[in-house]
Image (tube, rainbow, N blue to C red):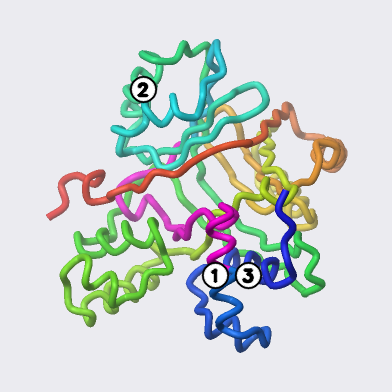
Amino acid sequence: MYKLTKVDRILVMELLNNSRTSIKEISKKFGISRSSISNRIKILEEKGILSGYNVDFNPTFVGIFPVGILIKTKKIPEINEIKQITKDIPNIYRCSLCAGPFNIQIRMYIHKLEEMQKIMEKFNQTLEIEDFEYLINTERTFFLRDFLGLGLKINQVYGPFHYGLKLDMKCNRTELKILTLLTQNCRLSMSAIAKIIKKPLSTVNFCFKKLKEKKVIEKFSTFINVTKFGYSIDHIKIRVKESNEIIDKKIFKFCRDSDEIFIYNKTFGKWNYNLQLFVKSAEETYLLVKQLQKEVPEIDKLDVFRIYAGYSHAVDFNKLVKGLS
């Protein structure tokens, strides 16, 4: 297990907060030399702790919506088996192995639910699927905590961001090219993006500004492998007896008051909510679930699964989006 230095912890928290924060800005804020910051970021990347820089965006404004699928297979697959299946499926952007009722989680972008069924058929050709279920986010909120114990006053809330099944294209081809590059590495400079897509810098700056103004871009973040320094990512799926605004507020308040929960999702389908946690032990999750059930007696069913390995795919939105001039 890797032991984070104080500078490492500062960098992880800053990049979770805004992964486009420059080295110059971090240096000025914390009084750390730029060379130290550059060296530590390089080490964190090499150790696989910082495993990518991405942009959180509203996919319905790009003509697609996100689906999370949980799959139970007869035999637990190797990660390379899943990579082989997903390499030619452009919709998929994240795959993980899980512990719990399901052993695979995949995340994808689709235009309609029929596409999901076709993708599941491809999985079933290689893996013997016993069961699967899907989660479609309709609302999402990020909570930034001081989970690394920096002693800083960190308790920021991003959102709620509202999604849904109604697609509302707000991007042109150039904006989609920029968004594609930002989801692959949102620390790319505007000049680097302009060079890649062969557009004037002024055009790229204008489109980037429009993406933020139109609320397509919501937040710049980073993928961190918390298992490298002693944490796990657990998910709690929740179904309530009757979904209503009062229960929404109860669960949201619980999430806001909890130090472990970092993402709150309202979902469409079999489940009403999906919470994501950073925890150091299964006992922490158990105690949190017990407290949640006590504070929200309207909960009908709970399910927990843990992410323990995964990888990301780059997605080309121009290929996914159809009928755009």
In percent of the image, x 63 and y 36: which residue is there? 308
The magenta segment: 41-67
Task: Inspect the image, locate mark 2, and give the three-letter code of the amino acid beneath it.
Answer: Gln
Q: Is residue 167 left or right of residue 310?
A: left
Mark count: 3
Query: Which dot marks residue 110?
Result: none
Query: Which dot marks residue 117?
Result: 2
Q: Is residue 252 left or right of residue 85?
A: right
| SS type, badge 1 | loop
- Name the front one of labels 3 and 2: 3
Is residue 65 part of the magenta span, yes or no?
Answer: yes
316, 321: nearer the viewer: 316
Q: Answer with mark 1 or mark 3, whichever residue precedes in sequence.
A: 3
- Which residue is the site of mark 1? 18
Q: Position of residue 64 (x, y in %)?
A: 33, 45
Q: Answer with mark 3 or mark 2, whichever residue precedes in sequence.
A: 3
Q: Is residue 298 left or right of residue 104?
A: right
In percent of the image, x 76 and y 46: which residue is there? 279
- Category of crowding for the residue at label 2, using alpha-carbon neighbours closer than 10 angstroms: few (below 14), some (14–19), many (at least 20): few
Query: Which dot marks residue 11?
Result: 3
Q: Answer with mark 2 or mark 1, whichever residue precedes in sequence.
A: 1
- Category of crowding for the residue at label 3, using alpha-carbon neighbours closer than 10 angstroms: few (below 14), some (14–19), many (at least 20): many
